[in-house]
Image: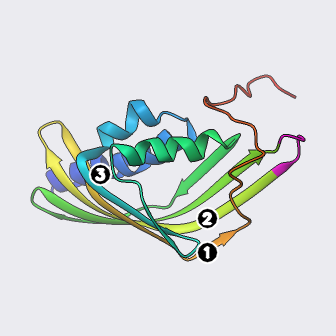
């Protein structure tokens, strides 16, 4: 593997990992536009339902979901990456844990097992995801749309006992 290919793999891995970071740190507006092309196609198959998260409207939908979570953790396994010049493909298994706090203080947990299948393009400013397909063949629990507290920002847990 030559140095250029190693650098491509590192940069592509960073793009994929930063999407999880955007979700978990609730930095949708700041990070997602820098990780996807403006005309990206982002499609999920969740609980038997096709969902379109393509920008720009799709980024607001991601934000809507994650604001209803006290905490999320997107654990993205190492990607299998294939680089073909200025395009690449990557597959990355992911387990996403979503913790919600209901109005009565009890908690709801929704766990999703999925895989990110990405097609990326090299731009002057770096690699970007142009197409993401996410089959999620297993989930445990259910996302609760109503009756949960909103957390528009990452909660400050430092120093809490």
Q: Residue at x 74, y 47 (%)?
A: 100
Disc 3 residue crowd, few under 14, some 14–19, many 20+, Cα 10 Å: many
- Callout 2: SS: strand
- Callout 1: SS: strand
Disc 1 residue crowd, few under 14, some 14–19, many 20+, Cα 10 Å: few
Q: Are marks 2 and 1 in contact (CB under 8 Å)?
A: yes
Q: Which of the two discs, 2 and 3, labels the residue nearer the N terminus?
A: 3
Q: Give the magenta-colored segment's residue range.
A: 103-107
| In the depicted structure, whether residue 121 falls above or below residue 84 | above
Horizontally, residue 113 falls left or right of residue 141, namely: left
Q: Are marks 1 and 3 in contact (CB under 8 Å)?
A: no
Report x, y in % for residue 139. Answer: 65, 70
Instruction: Identify the residue under disc 2.
Output: 112
Q: Can residue 34 be seen in the rendering of this structure?
A: yes
The span from disc 1 to disc 3 (Cα, nearest Å) is 26 Å
Instruction: Identify the residue under disc 3.
Output: 12
In depth, the one of 53 and 111 nearer the eye is 53
Q: Which of the two discs, 2 and 1, labels the residue nearer the N terminus?
A: 2
Report x, y in % for residue 121. Answer: 18, 53
């Amino acid at each position: 593997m030559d140095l250029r290919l190693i650098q491509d793999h590192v940069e592509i891995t960073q793009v994929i990992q930063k999407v999880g970071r955007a979700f978990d740190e609730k930095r949708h507006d700041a990070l997602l536009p820098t990780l996807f092309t403006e005309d990206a196609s982002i499609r999920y198959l969740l609980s038997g339902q096709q969902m379109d998260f393509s920008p720009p409207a799709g980024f607001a939908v991601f934000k809507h979901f994650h604001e209803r979570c006290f905490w999320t953790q997107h654990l993205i396994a190492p990607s299998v990456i294939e680089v073909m010049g200025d395009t690449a493909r990557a597959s990355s298994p992911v387990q996403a844990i979503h913790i919600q706090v209901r109005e009565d203080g009890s908690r709801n947990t929704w766990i999703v097992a999925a895989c990110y299948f990405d097609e990326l393009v090299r731009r002057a400013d770096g690699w970007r995801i142009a197409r993401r397909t996410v089959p999620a063949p297993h989930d445990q629990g259910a996302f609760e749309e109503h009756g949960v507290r909103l957390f528009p920002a990452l909660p400050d847990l430092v120093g809490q006992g």
